Amino acid sequence: MAESSHKRDTNARRLPRPSVLAGSVAALATLSVVSVGVLSSSPAASVLMADDPSDTGSGQVAAAPEVELAADRGLAPLSRSAVRGTTLEEVPTALERVTAPAAVDRAVAAADDQRWSTADLNLWSGPSDAAANVGLLESADKVLATGRTFLGRDEVVVDGASRWVTAGYLADEKPEPEPKPEPEPETATASGSAVDTSGGCTNGTSVPSGVSANIVSVHAAVCAAWPEISTYGTFRSDGEHAQGLAVDIMTSGQTGYDIADYLRANAGSLGINYIIYSQQIWSVDRAAEGWRGMEDRGSTTANHYDHVHVTTY
């Protein structure tokens, strides 16, 4: 029997309708576009895209990530030029901190430690070598100490003002006064010969009027013991010479050493403050240290090799 041409093929499958296929393709395309749009609009995507200048597509260099992130947070970006133009405030030195008016006022106001000087001490306006000598604190005088020590000097209060003295000469208790040495008619020099200081000056030299009484005494003593010395420099326009408190005894070599040692031994009776000779200095306020070396000032005269310098009170 002939088979019917209309019998269904058992392997045949239904083909999708064109309208259904078109809808699926459209849905897939829409999903892809939405995904790309979400990725492009996120901050992370913005940073990643900006890292690659080739992705800008406009010919302009993309902004740096940190600039975009700063803008997102409402912050102004930091400029390298602004950092380079910043100057650091200068840090004050230790000396400036110690001598600052506020620090000095606090120290003076808080001073309550009563101390006594164990020697005659020069009073200085500050702790540095550049400070001015503003007076004398005599041995056994009572002062208030602030407790501050700097550059080898102790700070004390004198008449309500900050003053500085050589460190190590303030005691907790008042020292017993030592009798001042009496001038002796004869004193042995370093060379061993006897010096007669009572005979007066016989070589015709003198010092001008207007110098201190102590300068007159120093000249008379040296002239009596060393009549060969004929030049004494007193007044000139600078420092203690201008005040009539200093004299230069023009000599050199061993004679200079003899005169310097003699004056040091009689400093109390002659009213001597300090002596300089041969680039060395001895002073009353640091008498315990003996002769101390000085810096090189560049010439024979400046280093006191050709004269003995004496400053008195």
Image: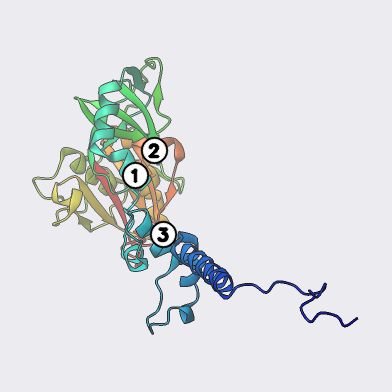
> Residue 246 in the image: x percent, y percent?
22, 48
Secondary structure of the residue carrying tag 2 is strand
What residue is shown with label 1? 95
Q: Which residue is situated farthest in the right direction here?
A: 1
Report the amino acid beneath label 3. Answer: Leu
Q: Are marks 1 and 2 in contact (CB under 8 Å)?
A: yes
Q: Quadrant of residue 133?
A: top left
Q: Earlier in the sequence, mark 1 or mark 2?
A: 1
Q: Nearer the viewer, residue 177 or 2?
A: 2
Residue receiving disc 3: 69
Percent position (x, y) of residue 228? 29, 57
Image side of residue 264 versus residue 10, left or right: left
Quadrant into which the C terminus falls: top left
Numbered label attached to residue 64: none
Residue in the image at 14% along x and 46% along y: 243
Front: mark 1 or 2: 1
| Contact flag, marks 2 and 3 (Cβ < 8 Å) | no
* Res 230 seen here: yes
Q: Secondary structure at mark 3?
A: helix
Query: On the rendered image, what quadrant is the N terminus found in?
Result: bottom right
Q: Which residue is mark 2?
A: 150
Amino acid on which disc 1 is placed? Leu
Q: Quadrant of residue 274?
A: top left
